[in-house]
Image (cartoon, rainbow, N blue to C red):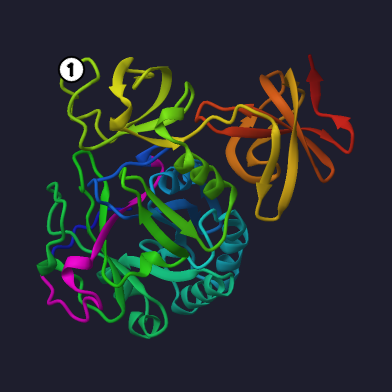
Amino acid sequence: MVQSSKSTTATIHQLATVSADKREQGVDWSKYQGTYGAYGRADDKFVISQIGGFYDGSFIPQDTYSTQVTSAIAAGKYVHTYIYGQFSTRAQADAMLNYYLPKVQTPKQSIVALDVESGTPNTDAVNYALQRIKDAGYTAVLYGYKGFLTDKLDLMSLAKSWPLWLAEYPDYQVRTSPDYSFFPSYDNVHLFQFTSTYKAGGLDGNVDLTGLTHNGYTSRTTSDSGKTTVKTTTSTPAIAAGQQANNTAKRDLKAGDVVKVNLGATKWATGQGIPAWVRGKTYTVSAVSGTRVLLGGIMSWANRADVEILATTQTTAGTQTYKDGQWTIHAEDGTFTANRGLSVWYWPGYSATGARYYSGESVHYYGYVRNGQYVYIAYHASDGLTHYLAVRDNGVALGTFR
């Protein structure tokens, strides 16, 4: 999110409904945090991922959104959604939400926040948009900088109905815990974004003051081995992929899976020290040998215990379950070459990745799915997930097969 230049000291007012030792910290992500995101602390509990932006009629979706949701679920975090919203009328609010709400990959009741920090927002339009988010079954939250929101909106009236997520930074030094002397005092503040430099290089750090980030989740448990699992109120393709990764035992790691090097990891499997810049980064596994995994890109062997699984490669055909039903991936090995531009999907016809295959481009696939009027091929993408591509429309081939 855009950095604030404000550093006005504020008195804490209606700060929290939970004791200070139970306030949980977390991060918010955009495309700048990459395909699988990043954390500032090993004990971060939640993630709020940007699905995209709306700029007075223009849409800029974030192609990292679905994979970030998947990786956060795999890591046992509460994960939520935000939309960068630059709009000033109800008509624009409708256009924005008609586009983004069907694409939300976090569970019902989870946070869908409106990031209002630029343009000429209108109180009525913002209130209308938040009500639409609530009516869609999500927890509607208003994000922004107190100065901007109070200057542009009747924030007092909005705060009576909607939880606030406010930002205020004392400086741009790396800090891993809030400085409450800079808290943006206001009614109904539930989330406090206290830094944009949660780690070197930039990352937003937040604290949940009231437990709002638990919305959409029925439980969060940690096993004796240290693996944390969250259960959601509803499922989506990104959640299902994350749960699959979370359910995969480290002993079952295989080439193609995506892992994160734990922030607390200190030594490679070969005994040398792990550089600080490696910790917290994600890598695709190139090979597995006993209790060691070879990390692609840097080609270094890590101990299996020092990595966390964020995404797994699906290698077999069979029945796949989605919240709206089931379909079967029929095993078939082949190569498809598109004869037109085709969208790539995380699930057959659901949740576009933002990527496309263009005329003349080819992909090797391992199976196919029928869904409605379309036939989709299933293939392994570079992010470790199965992706889908429509190859027939009402029986008409959209390319060639071999």
User: Is 363 on the left-hand or right-hand side of 280?
Assistant: right
Residue 141, quarter of picture: bottom left
Of residues 259 and 207, the one nearer the viewer is 259
In the image, is residue 257 part of the stretch drawn in magenta? no
Residue 98, quarter of picture: bottom right
What residue is shown at x 34% (from left), y 22% (from top)?
Answer: 291
What residue is shown at x 50% (from left), y 46% (from top)?
Answer: 243
Does the rendering let one see residue 256? yes
User: Is 375 on the left-hand or right-hand side of 323?
Assistant: right
Residue 347 place in picture, x, y as percent: 65, 42
Residue 209 place in picture, x, y as percent: 26, 70
Residue 383 vertical position relative to residue 360 in the rendered view, above or below = below
Does the rendering let one see residue 62? no
Q: What amino acid type is highlighted by mark number 1?
A: Gly
Secondary structure of the residue carrying numbered label 1: loop
Residue furthest front in the image: 224
What residue is shown at x 70% (from left), y 44% (from top)?
Answer: 349
Residue assigned mark 1: 271
Q: Which residues are magenta?
A: 8-31
